[in-house]
Image (cartoon, rainbow, N blue to C red):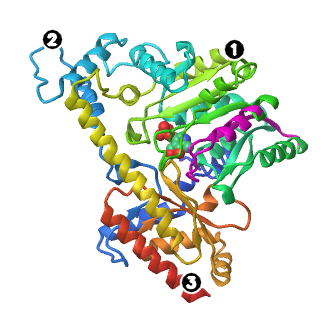
């Protein structure tokens, strides 16, 4: 007879404290309350709104953004590949059939349901990424330094894991910041060193602040080893200038930091702002930086007008790493076999879309139409968020120059702040929970991303594809904000 087990192996006391201490604001208390509401709505419970409006997550297709036809056609054909058998592909464009055939004939093994033959991914796709980087940055990429990955997240995890080897090892990350970085710093047993972005200067990176954070960290006995630069920024929606990027690259070089260039939003740049890749800027700075600075730069199919978050496709490319570090990357990738195969295909169709002079005019025209439609909508909504939020009492926000978010400052009445204090929660979480109850809008409080002490913010996405839903939501929010200020002032 077995004895009855006295307790769970995994419980509050036994689970690793680094896991317990890591946080994810995007799926934090507001999103959790929204899930609960959804369940209650399904049982007939009435709220002050008809539908929840998910403005918390940068998950384009969950919010109605349609996929790009060419990429989906190539994927569909490959998922159903029967070349050589009597299967008709008449419903697909000839260009998509040709691309699918090209991938299938050149990838190893020639089966999308198999692990890829190498941990760095399919060669025909890697070649397309290399061409894409050459066209963007004017550099020739060594294929052995390029990996297809499980979104950009995998690259972030790999590099933070490699960097953190001691409880005092630290990575410099911006405030506010995309939560995966803080979560990994904590989960891998290291430290995060925050550098501030300047809200009064459209969230630009401030060199003096960077130097000060670095020095403070050193004075505290920490060992900063890397710096993450998110451009365009999440949650802050800024696009960094070339000068800003030069400054941070030189700073990283002088202080022996590895640069993590997170550029997943490079296709989300609006209203005449210009994206400069860190890889390109590093090349422009010339020697010794270009031949010595350790950098990893990454891209993803999740954002932009591609919006294929669920396919988990991305790539990362590194420069100037020690050969032992390269071996470790290979090992870490090999342990998990390969990136998801559909994600790899999606990377290929993202970096090498239908092109004039190469593909048929109808396919190019459909691709351009779809891209312009999605991109135009995102750009327009970014502008609307800026205007509508700035028109609300006690809310100011910078222009969303890029990415998918507005990170607006909340100037809340004293009485409301005191009420939040009495509830033991941050005032911006109190605000977001109120907004949810009143309007159904799911948002993320700024406190979840880290922010300057004493300030309060809200992150909202410009991804709501349906104009009416967006307009109605912003009108409802306007009303809620006016009432809140009336009640608490
Ligand atoms: C700045 C940033 N980096 C990385 C990621 C992760 O992207 P992926 O879906 O490619 O893993 C996100 C996702 O929102 C992000 O905002």
Task: Please indicate whether residue 211 sits to the left or right of residue 184 in the image.
Answer: right
Q: Which mark is residue 485?
A: 3
Residue at the spot 49% in from the left edge and 45% down from the top edge: 269
Q: Which mark is residue 324?
A: 1
Q: Is mark 2 within 8 Å of ligand 1?
A: no
Q: Quadrant of the image for the C terminus?
A: bottom right
| Residue 390 falls within the magenta-colored stretch | no
Residue 101 in view (yes/no) = yes
Residue at the spot 23% in from the left edge and 30% down from the top edge: 363
Q: Position of residue 360 (x, y in %)?
A: 22, 25
User: Which numbered disc, 2 or 3, marks the residue that appears first in the sequence?
Assistant: 2
Task: Please indicate whether residue 229 sits to the left or right of residue 81 in the image.
Answer: right
Q: CA distance from mark 2 to mark 3?
A: 69 Å
Residue at the spot 31% in from the left edge and 47% down from the top edge: 373
Q: Which residue is identified by label 2? A: 84
- Where residue 362 sits, quadrant-wise, is top left
Instruction: Give the magenta range.
Output: 221-250
- Where residue 123 sits, quadrant-wise, is top left
Q: CA distance from mark 2 to mark 1?
A: 44 Å
């Amino acid at each position: 007879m077995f004895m009855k087990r006295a307790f769970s192996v995994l419980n509050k006391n036994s689970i690793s404290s680094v896991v317990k201490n890591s946080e994810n604001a995007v799926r934090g208390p507001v999103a959790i309350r929204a899930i609960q509401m959804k369940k209650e709505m399904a049982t007939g419970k009435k709220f002050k709104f008809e539908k929840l409006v998910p403005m918390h997550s940068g998950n384009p297709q969950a919010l109605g953004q349609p996929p790009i036809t060419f990429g989906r056609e190539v994927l569909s054909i490959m998922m159903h590949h029967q070349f050589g058998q009597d299967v008709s592909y008449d419903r697909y464009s000839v260009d998509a059939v040709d691309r699918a055939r090209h991938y299938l004939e050149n990838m190893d093994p020639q089966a999308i349901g198999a692990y890829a033959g190498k941990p760095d991914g399919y060669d025909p796709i890697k070649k397309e990424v290399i061409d894409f980087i050459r066209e963007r940055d004017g550099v020739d990429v060594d294929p052995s330094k390029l990996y297809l990955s499980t979104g950009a997240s995998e690259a972030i995890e790999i590099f933070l894991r490699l960097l953190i080897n001691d409880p005092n090892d630290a990575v410099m990350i911006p405030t506010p910041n995309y939560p995966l970085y803080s979560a990994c710093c904590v989960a891998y047993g290291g430290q995060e060193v925050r550098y501030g972005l300047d809200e009064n200067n459209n969230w630009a990176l401030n060199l003096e602040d960077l130097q000060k954070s670095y020095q403070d960290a050193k004075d505290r006995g920490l060992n900063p080893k890397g710096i993450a630069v998110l451009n365009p920024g999440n949650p802050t929606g800024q696009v960094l200038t070339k000068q800003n990027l030069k400054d941070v690259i030189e700073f990283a070089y002088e202080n022996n930091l590895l640069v993590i260039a997170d550029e997943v939003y490079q296709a989300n740049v609006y209203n005449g702002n210009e994206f400069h890749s860190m890889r390109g800027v590093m090349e422009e700075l010339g020697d010794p930086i270009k031949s010595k600075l350790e950098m990893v730069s990454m891209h993803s199919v999740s954002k932009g007008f591609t919006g294929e978050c669920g396919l988990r496709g991305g790539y990362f490319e590194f420069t100037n790493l020690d050969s032992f570090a390269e071996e470790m990357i290979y090992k870490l990738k090999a342990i998990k076999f390969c990136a998801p195969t559909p994600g790899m295909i999606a990377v290929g169709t993202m970096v090498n879309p239908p092109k004039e002079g190469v593909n048929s005019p109808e396919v190019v025209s459909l691709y351009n139409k779809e891209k312009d439609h999605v991109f135009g909508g995102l750009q327009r909504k970014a502008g609307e968020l800026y205007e509508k939020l700035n028109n609300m009492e006690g809310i100011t926000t910078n222009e969303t120059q890029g990415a998918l978010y507005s990170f607006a400052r909340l100037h809340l009445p004293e009485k409301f702040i005191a009420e939040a204090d009495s509830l033991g929660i941050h005032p911006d979480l109190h605000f977001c929970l109120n907004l949810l109850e009143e309007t159904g809008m799911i948002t993320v409080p700024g406190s979840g991303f880290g922010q300057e002490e004493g300030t309060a913010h809200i992150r909202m996405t410009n991804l709501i594809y349906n104009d009416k839903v967006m307009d109605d939501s912003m009108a409802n929010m306007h009303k809620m904000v006016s009432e809140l200020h009336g009640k608490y002032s």
